[in-house]
Image: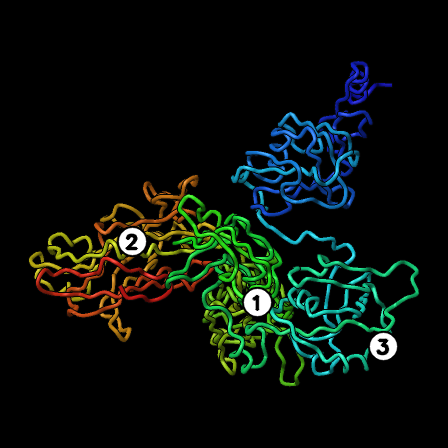
Amino acid sequence: MKTSPCRRQLAVSLLLGCWFPCCVTQTTATTARPSPPSPTPQAQAEPLRVRLAGHPRKHNEGRVELFHKGEWGTICDDDFSIANANVLCRQLGFVSATGWTHSAKYGKGQGKIWLDNVLCNGGERSIGLCKSRGWGNSDCTHDEDAGVVCKDERIPGFVDSNVIEAQVDQNQIEEVRLRPVVATAQRRVPVTEGVVEIKHGDGWVQICDLGWTIKNTRVICGMLGFPHEKKVNRSFYRLYLQRQKNSFLVHSVACTGTEIHLAACPLEFRKPNSSVSCEGGTAAVVSCMPGPLFMQSSGLKKKLKTSRNVRLKGGARLGEGRVEVLKDSEWGTVCDDRWNLQSASVVCRELGFGSAREALTGARMGQGMGPIYMNEVKCVGQERSIWKCPFKNITSEDCQHTEDAAVRCNVPYMGLESSMRLAGGRTRYEGRVEVLQPDSNGTLSWGLICGETWTTKEAMVVCRQLGLGYANQGLQETWYWDSSNVTEMVLSGVKCSGGEPSLSQCQHHKSLSCQKSAARFAAGVICSETASDLILNAPLVQQTVYIEDRPLHMLYCAAEEDCLSKSAAKANWPYGHRRLLRFSSQIHNIGRADFKPKAGRHSWVWHACHGHYHSMDVFTHYDLLNANGTRVAEGHKASFCLEDSDCEEGISKRYECANFGDQGITVGCWDSYRHDIDCQWVDITDVKPGNYIFQVVINPNYEVAESDFSQQRHEVQLQVRRPPNLAAQLPQRGRLQRGGREEV
């Protein structure tokens, strides 16, 4: 009988008194010998899960925790080294480690200490392949938990891990809900009042209300997406609940009110085989108050207004985004140093949502522009605004926009996804839109939407409603997705602003009116987890704007490309001049996906005057408006060539117009148009002296999907004076505010 190569290798290894893995192609190591140090075997074939935990920390640092045998545990700091840290950081998706910590710098962990005396050479693919005392064999306490600090640079292809989430024992509390008992409340969404129930196995169990406080209620409401709690009529519920058969899992809850999950509160669970249920008490009942977005009563909406000096930007779903705060009429961001769930929860509640589900660091929701106002925010969790929390002011050395903080808030369950679906797509992120509508008999059935007026903005609402991220495209024809038996058009004339949480809040025809009513012309969408986001560098426009009188003989190319006002056609060429309002512009992509032209290369247009292909007919509008908003002059920018003029440090250019190159704007890069190039102007030859508003609108036709269309429009007020020097006069001080109007 032949000896297998694996067996031969094993025999040699044992003779040498050493231990090597039997076959390098095996993914599961053999059981280690008990004498330390030895390689740490992995008990499962799947990759070892590693996470960073503790506080205060950023996304690239923290206490090391490993998931083994269904349980998270820590690593002891005995014999820990930078080589160990390098292995762990690579497992977490970072290129390397910059340091490591000992003595539970990020707080003491819980549960098992899985590894001790770990010795890596630095090249291992997993910490489980390094030598150690073996899994669960340790003489340490959690005072010796090890941590790592990773270099803030991701390995290409790794999914971002910069999320600080609630790490609590949820094995005993899987899910929490409110069960309404009043008949009218059972039909309302969201459910704001009822019996607190915990998912347990295949059923639901209750919590005993003995010693129940409003602080417990606050935590429950926050988990369910509600910013406020209120008192409940316990007498009414007691009469009802005494007639019900209750099963109590939890006998005592003692929350402080700042926890973001019930499982983080001190709990006393029912002991096995205990006969005591809830003597002298009954099932806990809570009542919550939703934020204005989720209220049925318009009167209450007016009373409970959300903050106007805090907002979320760049998020795909309701209640998530980059945190931005308003100061001195200018929006800025928050640095992620010490960013945690308590501070994130204050922001969420301030905006009408519940507590924070996740606190995100490292510009996970895209980088902002402009100032960074706050650093090391330290909220307790009870504050009514992030501005009421202690924080440090920012210096230019403290933070960059790569460290912008973001949140994901708990939002109430509205059941919005149940009234819509996508059909026929190749993946769950695309397909023909089918909506659930009542017919003449009141029976609910699925139907199509007329695609005639369908745009990217309507598609954005559909993708948000279905929890599928951003809209990549809105489609007016879907004949290639003909795989559903739904053929009837039920909705037409749908028009959305793009920010609505559901399609039902958009405008539409009262009765169906669709010229092309065949199923092939039904509306469809393609959704995406990421999207671009274009922002104008507004101060640059203000700093560079001026008036030039340019001779006609130097404007033949511009006239050919329709960059002058209509009256130029009647001029006495080549004599005379045109008066031009000139300026430089920079358009930054601060989103999470590259901005690429909708049209393919085959439809790009060659412009001989500029010597390159133009990929978009309309990319930006330049307009001069009078006081009542009427356009008096416009920039006839015929088309654009999109490229990376420059990028943030560490980001490489990907798009270049020269030599028929690929066109677009990379995330973290910007496309620049200098004031001295053709067509970078507004022809104001026919404009009378006076006060005007200069307006720049990016991607005005919504041709290319973005994460946020509300930041397209940028305005500044200016004064055009004719004599004595024919120049546009602008004061030295002032700002051009993104998405708003500010006099300078």
Q: Which residue is mark 1?
A: 433
- Picture quarter containing residue 213? bottom right
Helix, strand or loop at label 3? It is loop
Q: Which mark is residue 540?
A: 2
315 w.r.t. 194: above or below: above
Looking at the rendered structure, the secondary structure element under dot 1 is: strand
Name the kind of residue labelled 1 in the image. Val
Please give the name of the residue rendered at 37% of the width and 48% of the height, measured from the top-left corner. Answer: 670
* Left or right of 153 on screen, residue 233: right
Question: Which amino acid, by three-letter code, is at mark 3?
Answer: Gln
Residue 181's place in the image compared with 317, above or below, is: below
Q: Are marks 3 and 1 in contact (CB under 8 Å)?
A: no
Q: Marks 3 and 2, Cα distance to the nearest angstrom?
A: 68 Å
| Residue contact at pointers 1 and 2, CB within 8 angstroms | no
Q: Quadrant of residue 140?
A: top right
Q: Which residue is mark 3?
A: 244
Q: Is residue 592 visible?
A: no
Question: Which kind of residue does numbered mark 2 sit on?
Answer: Leu
Q: Earlier in the sequence, mark 1 or mark 2?
A: 1
Asked if the residue under mark 2 is in contact with the one under mark 3, i.e. CB atoms within 8 Å, the reply is no
Which residue lies most toward the top here?
Answer: 16
Q: Earlier in the sequence, mark 3 or mark 2?
A: 3
Name the one closer to the observer, 427 or 91.
91
